[in-house]
Each structure stands twice: as C-alpha cells, then as structure tokens.
Amino acid sequence: MRFLKNVRGEAAGEAMPPLDIVVTRQDVTDEASFRGSGVLELYEALFPLSERDSSDDIVRWVLSEDLGERRQFALGDRQLSYCLDSRCFVLRAAERAIGLGFFTCDHTSHLIFCNYVGVAPAWRGGGLARAFYREMVDMLDELFPRNIGVVLEVEPFDRGQLETVIGDLEQTGRRQLDAHEAATIRKFLRVCWYHKLGYRFFCDAATARPLQCRSPCLDPALPPTEWVGAEEDYWLMWHARERAAPAPSSAGELWRQAVEAIYVEILAKSLVDEDPQRRRGYWDYATALVAETVQRTAVAEVTLARYLGPDDSPLLSRWRRLAIDLPI
C-alpha cells in the first residue's frame, strides 16, 4: 500500500480523506476484497460497454491467471509458451475506489501494456489523476525491475472531424453530444492527457503521422467469417522507463516488439490457450494479421514523436471553453 500525498480532488472539500493505492496480489489477495473495494463498479461507470472487458475476466487475470509464471500449451505439433503478470491498482478514499489502473507485463519482451487507467470525474482536479498515474509507474518499476517501458493503444481520430464537432458546438450552443461526437472528442482528449504524461507515438518519419496497427477480433468464439468485421484500428503510444536496461536499438525494432507483445503474447496466446484444439484457426488468423502489420510498416522509418503540436492547442482551448463534462 502507498499513500498519495500533496494532492487533492475536487470532491474532497475541506476534509479530504487519506488517499492510498493498493495493488492486487500484494495488498488485495482475494476476490471478495477486490470486488468489495468498488473498483469494478467504478470501471463500469468510467468506460462504455464497447470498451470494457468482462469484470469476471479481469478478476481472473489479476488474481488467479496472469501470475508471472510461464504457461505452455500444445498447438498441433508445436509447443508454445508465454509469461504474463497482470495487476490492478486501486486508488482509494476512505477504502472505496476512486481510481484504477490495469496493467499487464509481458515477461518475454519486458514491455508493460496499459489496459485501462481512470479516475472518478469528481476527483480529477488538483493534479490527482496525473499523480496517481506516476505513482503507479513507480510501483510497476518495483514489481517489474526489468521492464523497459509502457505501451498503450489509442483510437485514431481525424482532425477535420474534431474541428467540425467543436465548431458546431460553438455555433449552436448545444450541450449534448451524440455518440459519434463524444467518441471523437474523447479520443482527442485521451491523446492530450497521455502526451502530458510524456507518451510519444510511433510515427512514420516521412508523414509525421502515427503508424496504424490492427487488432484481431477479441472473441474467438465468433464464427470465423465474423472475425474480420470485429477487428479494430489503433495507434500505439510509448513511454520509456527512466534508467531502463538496454532497450531495442531503434524505434522500428521497438515498434515490432510492441505490436507482437500486445497482439501475440498478451492477446492471441492467452485466448488460444483456453482451448488450443478448437482455436488453431484463430491462431493462424491472428498471427497472420500481426505479421501483415509488421510487414506493412517494415519499410517505414519509425520515430517516436508527438502527434499533437502547437496548431492543436487552440482546439483544446476551444473545447475547454465550452465547459462540457465528458469523462475520458
């Protein structure tokens, strides 16, 4: 357990309760305590249904399955293995969850994947969200001393659509956003926040645009004919660990490792391991899609860079002046 000091949330008022951070399998060791913290209710309140994993799956991953032990399974005449360690950090006020962070360390690549981070809207003022995130990173470095950094997915957004949405809100004065408008703004705000934390995009140096990768379908139980329709496009952001052990020699090699860690080591292997005999087809599909992403970007000169520049600052200022509450 760690106490978070010298910060305050907007909901705290004059009598702010002590804030602490607990982590699964260290401070929270059983399902009843984990569920009793209120973290799963907070998770469901913060993220739309389309972005959420099953709460039961999260409980299984962080408490009984992704334990940092190497797992093996047979796929035909091949033996495959992987080694994951998933942790959920819970920020608490008076022992009730007001923030969460869910991370998975892939011990093969020594990369940490950020699945979710969120803080209850009423507690986001006063730099609390940023302080919580930085404290989690320090705790991750202690848990996984060989890690070289954190990678995460963000949904691509279109600057033109963003300009259109904000302009229409300014002209009409309306306060309600439809689902598409909210998604467009939310994508932009998430990138702004991660940039503040020091994250950078994997970009094509020739175009200065983020490289795009494609996530396989997350549900192997669907008919194979539906897998392609359930794929999603993402940009990847990276934050290197300070004073880390030697990292890949180039951003291009790091990009390849990140793509393979997320979509093969963390995603495909764990899903196929649940039913290797029936999911051979899914394995072939998922690994082929990952190989296609790596091959498509192999000719690019990859660089780590910000995507949002000075020209985007006015858009953020205009959005803030609208004073519309939109949790990200």
Image (spheres, helix red, strand yellow):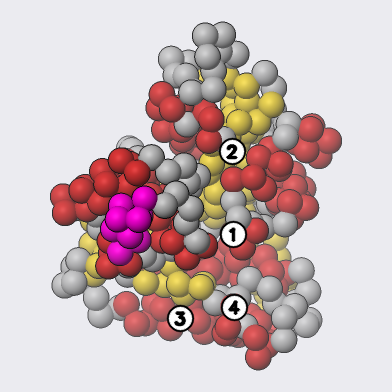
Name the residue: 48% across, 23% down. 10
Instruction: State yes or no: discs 4 and 3 in contact (Cβ < 8 Å).
Output: no
Q: Which residue is mark 3?
A: 291
> Which amino acid does the dot numbered 3 rest on?
Ala
Q: Position of residue 311 (x, y in %)?
A: 16, 54
Residue 155 visible at all: yes
| 188 lies above or below 280 | above
Disc on the earlier residue, 3 or 2: 2
Disc on the earlier residue, 4 or 2: 2
Q: Which residues are magenta?
A: 164-173
Q: Which residue is mark 2?
A: 100
Q: Position of residue 203 (x, y in %)?
A: 26, 65
214 or 14: which is nearer to us? 14
> Which amino acid does the dot numbered 2 rest on?
Leu
Disc on the earlier residue, 2 or 1: 1
Q: Position of residue 257 (x, y in %)?
A: 42, 64
> Which amino acid does the dot numbered 4 rest on?
Ala
On residue 51, the disc is 1
Name the residue: 37% across, 72% down. 212
Q: Position of residue 264 (x, y in %)?
A: 55, 70
137 or 187: which is nearer to us? 187
Disc on the earlier residue, 4 or 3: 4
> Which amino acid does the dot numbered 1 rest on?
Glu
Q: CA distance from mark 1 to mark 3?
A: 25 Å
Q: CA distance from mark 3 to mark 2?
A: 33 Å
Secondary element at tag 1: helix
